[in-house]
Amino acid sequence: MPDKKTPRPETEGIIGGATTSIALFQDRYVDMSVDLAGVILKNPVVVASGTFGFGREYGQFFDLSELGAVCCKGLTLYPREGNPAPRIAETPMGILNSVGLQNPGVDAFIEHELPFLRQYDVKIIANISGNTPEEYGIMCEKLSEAGVDMIEVNISCPNVKAGGLAYGTRPDLAAEVTREAKRHASVPVMVKLSPNVTDIAEIARAAADGGADALSLINTLRGMRIDVNTRRPILKMNTGGLSGPAVLPVAVRMVWEAATAVKLPILGMGGVSKGEDAAQLMLAGASAVAVGTALFNDPYAPLKVRDGLAQLAVRQGLGAVRDLTGGIRPW
Amino acid sequence: MPVQQICTVVSMEQLDANTWWMVLEVGKLVFERGLCGGQFLHIKCGDGQLLRRPISVARTQWDEPEDTAALIFEVRGEGTKWLSQRKVGDKLDVLGPLGNGFNVSDGSRYLLVGGGIGVPPLIEYGESPKWSKVAVLGFRTRDKAFPAVTSRFEENCEQTYICTDDGTLGRHGFVDGQVRDIFVKDKNFTGILACGPKPMLKSIAKIAAEFGVPCQVSMEERMGCGVGACLVCAIPMKDGTMKHVCKDGPVFNAEEVDWDA
């Protein structure tokens, strides 16, 4: 639990809405709760997989019950140590990473990390990556039984050689993995899509055909940065995944295209660092939004995004923040 | 437990073209949260830089109205350039205390080994009256051996040896030669506390193992969140696992590090 002496920045004018679903701003109430494939989040702000560990670190800064959901660091069936460092490079308004799914494995997560998160009033989304469809199935079974609220199936990690990206870029494989996950999961399954494709709608439809309950997008965009003096890439893996404000417009466009293609609820993400960014993704069709890279700049970014959304909803005269979803008026 | 702290710059001294000595008022981070030398502060460097910059703490002091922390840093890129342009009175958005300093105990005797910009994080250990210590400080050249830094060791250590790569000051050569010479005559040390470039640390770790002296090393890696969540600042360990500079380090036991990775 965060210690009481910790000064916590407050958003001016916002009352309530921290660990409840109702926020008050300028004497107007706004219902912050959203429905993501039947999972009710007290507010639409989720923290993105891979940027938040299993919640322990940022849990020192604020009460995790203030979030809509925690998307856990990507899990694999067996522990992985990840890629050699350097694993990060800063880029204009973004970062490249090549962590490579370092994680303690699904069993260690269930034994050591899940009980910690369960202390909080927050929805828990487990994120999984497999080398084969069978591995996705086994993990779905274990995690459903352990009682996570939702499973995010990562078919799009750009930093691992096997599986990962291949599943996310071929519609037939995306559908196959989704079907296998659905067959073994007893909680809603959300499929995380890669932006490294020509036609996101095609992959979205494949995941829908496979039985996905929700979609999340975007994962990182493949990128590269080179040190001109040494002529070597900054990342030891040469290439990595781009995230941060630089990718927001790509995320908005892809969420819009996916939302147009399928009827599934969407968790939108990519470069969100303030309420207005989150509102863009929601207007494009997202039911909830994830905040990731912005955390590295400001540990309180998810709470500021949440409060910013509440203010924006009130200013626009909305009684519920979910009314933003799909509200885009395209030309 | 780390907190976000708005810190005021109380002094800013330029040591040479690209090295700065900055002192910050850090609230009660020293008194209440045990901020000490060898840990780091994760500093937001303007709105243009997405990532904060981890800067090692050289020394800390309980004080009124606020505690202070001294940071000695080199300008390496855009973030540290921004930091070097701060003026007295400017406010900084800081996360800290972060990382673990050296594990030390009162009444011990330590050999402090620093190389280049790895010397400042040893200052607090070199100044403390709680243990006796000998210092071996290595620099590229005479101009990099700032008296403001080296005098802190010379005034407080049993003995301070300076080495320069080009022989312009003190012993001509790297610190490992000096450390070996010391151990040949006297290896009555509780341990080595070392901070510097990785090849230096690797070499010191090897000598420490050879003479059977415990050795702690402070390591560097490109960092993201600074708090242990993003897992980018990975250092391979001998047992095949990864540890992270921000949360498990920056100080590691030399024998647990995989120096050949």
Image (spheres, coloured by chain):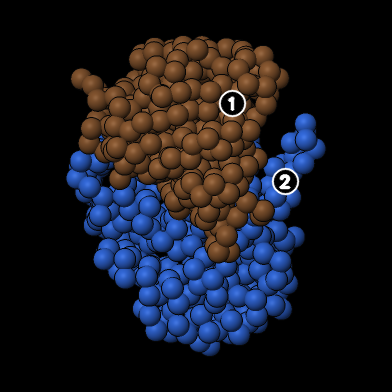
Chain colours: A blue, B brown
- The residue depicted at 45 percent of the width and 29 percent of the height is B134
Label 1, label 2: how far apart the Cα atoms are = 35 Å
Q: Looking at the image, how many numbered discs can be counted on the residues?
A: 2
Residue at the (75%, 60%) spot, across then down: A198
Chain containing the residue with disc 1: B
**Mark 1 residue element:** strand
Instruction: Determine which residue is flagged by label 1.
Output: B138
Image quadrant where residue A37 sits: bottom left
Q: Is residue A5 above or below residue B133?
A: below
Q: Chain of mark 2?
A: A
- Quarter of the picture holding the N terminus of chain A: bottom left
Compared to residue B233, the image places residue A37 above or below, namely below
Tell me residue A313's x, y (percent).
35, 47
Q: Is residue A306 above or below residue B135?
A: below
Frontmost residue, B121 versus B63: B121
The answer to the question of whether label 1 and label 2 lie on touching residues, with beta carbons closer than 8 A, is: no
